[in-house]
Image (cartoon, grey):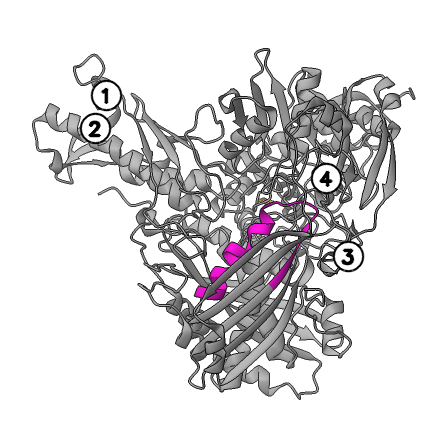
Amino acid sequence: MPAGCDIAFTLNGVKRELNVPAGMSALEMLRDKLGLTGTKYGCGEGECGACTILVDGRSMNSCLLFAADCDGRELVTIEGVATTPRGERLRDAFVANGAVQCGFCTPGLMVQASSLIERQPCATETEIRRGIEGNLCRCTGYRKIIDAIATAATEKSHE
Amino acid sequence: MSETLIGKRIPKLDAPDKASGKTRYIHDLEVPGALHAKILRSAQVHARIVSIDTSAAKALAGVHAVITAADVPWQRPIGVAKDHLPLKTDRVRSLRDEVAAVAADSEEIAETALRLIRVQYEPLPVVATPDQALAPGAPLIHPEPHGADSSPHLKSAGAPVAFAGKPDNIAMTFEYAQGDVAKGEAESDFVVEDVFKLHYVTHCCMGISGVIAEFDPNGNLLLYSNTQVPFLHKREFAELLGIDPARIRIIQPPIGGGFGSKLDIYPFEPIVIFLAKITRRPVKMVFTREEEFLASPTRQPVLLKLRSGCRKDGALTFRTVETVHDNGAYTSWGATTPFVMMQTISSLYRVPHCQYLTRAVYTNNPYAGSFRGYGNLQATFAVEAHMDKLAEAVGMDGLAFRLKNAQDPGEVTPQGMHFKSCGFKDCLATAAARSEFLRKQAENRARWKDPNPVKRGVGIASMLHVGGGAKIYPSDGCGTILKIDDFAHVTLMTGASEIGQGSETVLSQLVCEELGLPLSAVTVVNNDTDITPWDVGVHASRTTFIAGNSAIGAAKKAKAKILAAAAAKAGVPENELSLQSGYIVRSGKEKLFELGKFLRGLHFSDRAELVMTTFYYEPPSKHQDKGFKGDVSAAYAWATQVCEIEVDTQTGIVRLLKVTGAHDVGRVLNRLGIEGQIEGGIVMGQGYALTEDLMVEGGVVKNPNFRDYKLVTAPEIPEMDVSFIETLDGEGPQGAKGVGEAPAICIAAAVANAIYNATGTRITALPFTPENVYRALHGAAKAPAWSAAA
Ligand code: FES
Ligand code: FES
């Protein structure tokens, strides 16, 4: 058995120390080792966005990131995003706008949207659409997701 | 009066959890002590299995079981035609075929064990297309009975296992006729004929397939499953295991999308059950995305020859249709889609004479299942192309021609479908007016010769689909148990499954409307066959209609009991009482009792009435006869969609700019939910028309991933303008009809008509990818030909 890697990182604001196998993805670490199942596996190849998390504030596909490379970083998952004021605003906007159907894509989109409106608080329709280009949704046709993000962004700019 | 909930924008009840990442799908469930299963699939498209050696896999540490067909001699064929053993015995017929399975301590160990299994194959000639399958002397896919007669170990076990085999490659045929097509053709002034070719696509639910199976010491089976039809599956699993269905409990965790994909049993489910039985441990299996592409069902690819005619005045005279469906290696619901296709062909427009013949043909390809729209996308694609062509031949505009032939309310078609509510003409007129269809069509056409290589086009198409349940079984029904507790909190136990479509919300809404309660007063239980009453499953756009009527019925019964008790207690006539905003109210305004308090007061009285009631609803309609004549649904949904596109004739890129839809939905119940269904359906239709293409070559799926199988993404979606035509169906819950499938059905047909309007070129093969469109526009594509062998 090859020895795993000892890593230390911050997860949703809490310091964690962990030993992870070299080949393990951040997605597997979150779901299987840490029980944070809000982050979803949709493809494992960086093509669907269901596994989106924030790494040092930037959104990333956790299926493409090695767990070992999380050492020294700050990770935020949907469980973390959902409890921030921005996350709550987004959640309410997703709910009110009907942006959720089966919901499997939703956590990834929530995280992506959170990072999007943080970077571009006044994002236009086109910018929002481009911003979620990497997140697939089979149910909603995206219209209501785009509206939800726009709603949450507008509320922010009124604060 | 309490304010009505009907027609309001009601957020989905499960949305806050889903948006917070708290919802636990099957993938997120950990059962203590569970083993993990993996399946070894065939390495050959078509071959004899000579031998399987599992010894090395069995010897691997952490492996609890390695099974092949020999270990489960009692397994039985599954699927719609029962032509499919979960674990293959003597032969593999497609690359997805299940040869062996492993249960191990972890997925990684199971994966390693798979690589240690040695299978020797003797290749057989591959039947890659229906054409090849129908050719004289073609290799047969099911030449002999499966199992018992061909596998020695099964024979010795004397198991009653077999599918009888087929002397040809025809899995299923459907024939339908009305009137006399020869007479119809003789009366025609114009006749057109084309061959249409519809391609492979697949569901791509974001939540991939999975199952967890566990037996208790008494042999009772608990299944965590994503199925859309839990009650039918109980029966099928029971048959498969030879146990009493009452001993099977199915729990459905929240489901990450269905769209018809979860309507059948697939081999992985029995296999996981076998492993659980053999290891006496809970066993969990979740697909990878690649496996989902390879081993879940597809929409059925169809080759369709359509011949239609009309008179000079524009009245349709006849239609003759012949189709060949690529069934794949086994038979699932895909083979039965002609049942829906023939309705569009015979009854969307008035056609006196019709003939329809279809064959589903076995090949070594992935097998086709049911998929939102159920054959109707294919049928509508062909029919609506001919509506345009005939209109042009007659010299009428496409709208006037369609209006002339469109059905009216009250009509009974020659096939026997009775359109009690029908807003078809309103749909046509509304979508055309809102999109300025006629003006744009004329303008675009005038620009055919224009040097600008980027052209605009507008196209129209309409659809008819079941909207009041579907009597594919002798009856269609759904049970409800409704409980009101001491605090006026309602628990609604319904057989109807939630697959993301919002049934739990709309059912709550209907119940609250009846009981004068806020939505917060309801809890829905809809995912456990030990608790919920029977239902035939989520399909055919039936849930709002059937389960909705059932829920309303239960609520009405509860209300009657409460009001009777209240009338007795207050000494007032019952008919003066109503339920409003949580109160029992007299004459519409005088609050007599607070509902919760009143119910509590009934304890220990001679009228103790904690309300518990059941209701079952079956719509009154006649079943189809053997010639497919008769009604299949208590109500029908209608829609017209106009698509506006831009085609770059130099690249073949088609962009869908705008969809204007008008839908006869009976009545809007939850405006937010219905908009979501329609928008999602439009974009799924857009994918079918423009981007999605499961490439199957020689039985091999070439693009089993999202990089090469293109779903529509957010930047590509069109502007959507949706109108609702409310025809208030007499049978519908609050007048509503089903809508789930409708919005996906017309898009490809309307886009095809729009490409013609933009360029003057009519393309009869899907999908409209840049390459296909470019070839067609530059004369480098051959129009699809009717199968020589057919
Ligand atoms: S699971 Fe990571 S992008 Fe799909
Ligand atoms: S809501 Fe189902 S995939 Fe997006």
Same chain for the residues at labels 2 and 3, yes or no? yes
B274 w.r.t. B514: above or below: above
Mark 1 and mark 3 in contact (Cβ < 8 Å)? no
Does label 2 or label 3 sit earlier along the sequence? Answer: 3
Classify the position of ligand 2 by quadrant: top left, top right, bottom left or bottom right: top right
Cα–Cα span, label 2 and label 3: 72 Å
B254 w.r.t. A130: above or below: above
Of residues B641 and B295, which is closer to you in this image?
B295
User: What span is colored magenta in the figure?
Assistant: B323-348
Q: Quadrant of residue B644?
A: bottom right
Same chain for the residues at labels 2 and 4, yes or no? no
Q: Amino acid at mark 3?
A: Gly
Does label 3 or label 1 sit earlier along the sequence? Answer: 3
Q: Is the distance from the Cβ of mark 4 to the nearest ligand 1 atom less than 8 Å?
A: no
Cα–Cα span, label 2 and label 4: 56 Å
Q: Amino acid at mark 2?
A: Ile
Q: Secondary structure at mark 3?
A: loop
Cα–Cα span, label 1 and label 4: 57 Å
Q: Amino acid at mark 4?
A: Gly
* Residue located beneath label 1 in the image: B609
Chain designation of label 2: B
Looking at the image, can residue B596 be seen?
Answer: yes
Res. B137 mark? 3
Q: Amino acid at mark 1?
A: Glu
Mark 4 and mark 1 in contact (Cβ < 8 Å)? no
Same chain for the residues at labels 3 and 1, yes or no? yes
Mark 4 and mark 2 in contact (Cβ < 8 Å)? no
Q: Position of residue B72 (x, y in %)?
A: 71, 24
Cα–Cα span, label 4 and label 3: 64 Å
Does label 1 or label 2 sit earlier along the sequence? Answer: 2
Res. A57 mark? 4
